[in-house]
């Protein structure tokens, strides 16, 4: 049985993140969503909220809901390669939206392979979602913009409730 770890801050979760999980399930038997906790950042949502939002997003997505038993959600404060190794994962998976992200992810993939021997699979973003990032969503929300079509409904609802 093959297992892959998909890591990120997921603050907030976007439709692009869901797309990566859907596509990863076509290649791997199990996807572990690893929410990275970085004490140097000020997230919009707590780790517990992000886990809950992932669970809601999976339940609301017709494809992922059916595959729910193949998805687990965890969190880590350490190196993702070590988390993946401890999770007995076969690989890491990352979505890439642009050439600059490809460069950065290639560097990280090489470092992670050096640390643990794990390979990283890079998925090119869906052209309809490649312009969406958590950072962009945060900025749009901060200025009162419309994020319809960028995040799952549960995330849009949670963002609307933030002060």
Image (spheres, rainbow, N blue to C red):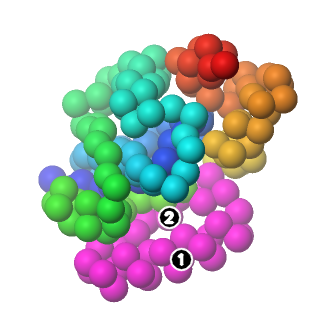
The residue sitting at 77% across, 38% down in the picture is 139
Seen from the viewer's position, the closer of residues 52 and 38 is 38
Residue 29, percent across and down? 24, 47
The answer to whether any part of residue 77 appears in the image is yes
The residue sitting at 71% across, 70% down in the picture is 99
Image position of 57 with respect to 115: above or below: above
Residue 40, percent across and down? 51, 56
Disc 2 element: strand
The residue furthest bottom is 114
The residue sitting at 56% across, 23% down in the picture is 155
* Quadrant for the C terminus in the image: top right
Image position of 24 with respect to 47: above or below: below
The answer to whether any part of residue 156 appears in the image is no
Query: Seen in the image, is 97 located left or right of residue 105?
Result: right
Query: Seen in the image, is 161 located left or right of residue 112?
Result: right
Seen from the viewer's position, the closer of residues 121 and 141 is 141
Who comes first in sequence, dot 2 or dot 1? Answer: 1
The residue sitting at 29% across, 73% down in the picture is 118
Which residue, given by chain and number where applicable, does mark 1 sit on?
106
Q: Nearer the viewer, mark 2 or mark 1?
A: 1
Point out the stretch of residues depicted in magenta.
96-125
Q: Quadrant of residue 14?
A: top right
Q: Are marks 2 and 1 in contact (CB under 8 Å)?
A: yes
Residue 162 drawn in magenta: no
Query: Seen in the image, is 120 located left or right of residue 124?
Result: left
Which residue, given by chain and number where applicable, does mark 2 sit on?
122
Mark 2 surroundings: few (<14), some (14-19) or many (≥20) residues within 10 A:
some
Disc 1 element: helix
Image position of 20 with respect to 80: above or below: above
- Please identify the dominant SS of the magenta region: helix
């Amino acid at each position: 049985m093959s297992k892959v770890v998909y890591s990120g801050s997921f603050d907030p979760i976007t439709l692009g993140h869901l797309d990566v999980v859907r596509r990863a399930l076509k290649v791997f038997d199990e996807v572990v969503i690893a929410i990275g906790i970085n004490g140097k950042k000020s997230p919009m949502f707590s780790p517990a909220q992000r886990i809950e939002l992932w669970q809601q997003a999976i339940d609301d997505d017709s494809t992922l809901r059916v595959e729910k038993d193949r998805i687990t959600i965890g969190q880590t404060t350490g190196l993702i390669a070590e988390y993946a190794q401890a999770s007995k994962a076969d690989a890491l998976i990352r979505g890439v939206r642009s050439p600059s992200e490809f460069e950065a992810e290639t560097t990280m993939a090489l470092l992670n392979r050096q640390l643990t021997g794990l390979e990283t699979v890079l998925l090119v973003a869906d052209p309809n979602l490649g312009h969406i990032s958590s950072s962009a969503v945060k900025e749009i929300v901060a200025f009162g913009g419309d994020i319809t079509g960028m995040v799952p409904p549960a995330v849009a609802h949670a963002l609307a409730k933030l002060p």
